[in-house]
Amino acid sequence: MVDLGLIIDKYHLERKSSEFINYLKTKVNLTIYLEEEYLLNHFKMDFNENLFFVKGKGDIILALVKTIEHETTIPVINSYKGIWTTFNRFMNSTLLKKAGIPVPRFSLNPENIVPAFNEHIVKNILDQKNYSFMPKIERLKGNLQVKDLRAISEKELFSNYFFYQEFIKSKWEYKIYGIGEDLLFYKQIPVLINPNKMESRKKIDEIPELGELVIKAMKVLDLKITSVDFLKSKDGEYFLTDINSSPNFNYIENGAKIIGDYLISEAKK
């Protein structure tokens, strides 16, 4: 039986991972490293695990991942680079664009200085905390402008700068889960139209173009497990709008088993 370490925060532990943890406990020797307790209970620094899996993106989690990567040869899924670049919207958009992956036009602008693209969504620069998308929809001179209230609440952290992303009108939002080399494809009505995203979500057949983009994005950002969101413009072009290093795989049928079995196979290598 392999030894697996789960680095996790309290939010994911209590709300998102019970089925996953219960499955792992029947298959591996599982050690849980809880972010909120780790600094007060740091007795275990002699790591003997075959593999670590990260479910969270807080600063203490990042520090622990970086320590493991620097001080041991134990693989970590996802890596420090993967976690940090995915929650930093400006950084991942820059890297993805440089790699030739289509992303909506974007910029960092001070408050009340609008970007060159008229229809846009204002997002938080660092999508690091565990809370839901909270849109405020407005129209200015006929142009749609969406503000994520999370960005407004965090503006003091960034000297009143915001991340602006061009708004892509799309009938569907496409969500692809990447688990190693395996991809799972879904679509749903965009959340701005139907906030209950799971109500309309359905599994779909593979879209080869999106599959190629997801695999490329995973390589660029050093991810082994991810979820990626796309919107399709009126011209038929797909744009990568969001990428996540800690996806909620409870939305996948048999998600706990799929992720668990993948981690076990990686730990045995």
Image: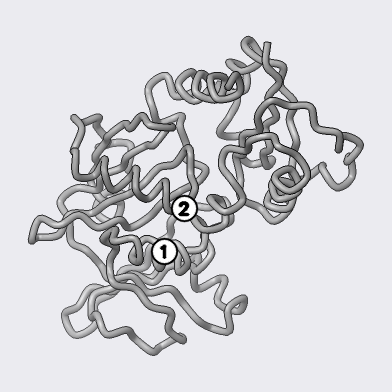
Position of 94 relative to 224 (above/below):
below
Q: Please name the amino acid that badge 2 sits on.
A: Leu
**The N terminus - image quarter:** top right
Mark 1 nearby-residue class (10 Å; few <14, some 14–19, many ≥20): some
* Camera-side residue of 162 and 7: 7
Give the residue at the far left of this rendering.
Answer: 235
Q: Please name the amino acid that badge 1 sits on.
A: Leu
Query: Residue 14 at x, y = what percent?
Result: 64, 33
Q: How many marks?
A: 2
Q: What element does badge 1 sit on?
A: helix
Query: Residue 23 at x, y = what percent?
Result: 58, 15
At 37% from the left and 67% from the top, the residue drawn is: 136
Q: Which mark is residue 221?
A: 2
The quarter of the picture where residue 72 lies is top right
Q: What element does badge 2 sit on?
A: helix
At 43% from the left and 73% from the top, the residue drawn is: 163
* Camera-side residue of 170 and 262: 262
**Position of 128 compared to 139: left or right?**
right
Query: Residue 219 at x, y = what percent?
Result: 42, 47
At 33% from the left and 58% from the top, the residue drawn is: 241
Query: Residue 262 at x, y = what percent?
Result: 49, 23
Mark 2 nearby-residue class (10 Å; few <14, some 14–19, many ≥20): many
Position of 148 relative to 64 (above/below):
below
Q: CA distance from mark 1 to mark 2?
A: 8 Å
Q: Which residue is mark 1?
A: 95
N-terminal label among 1 and 2: 1
**The C terminus - image quarter:** top right
Q: Which mark is residue 242?
A: none
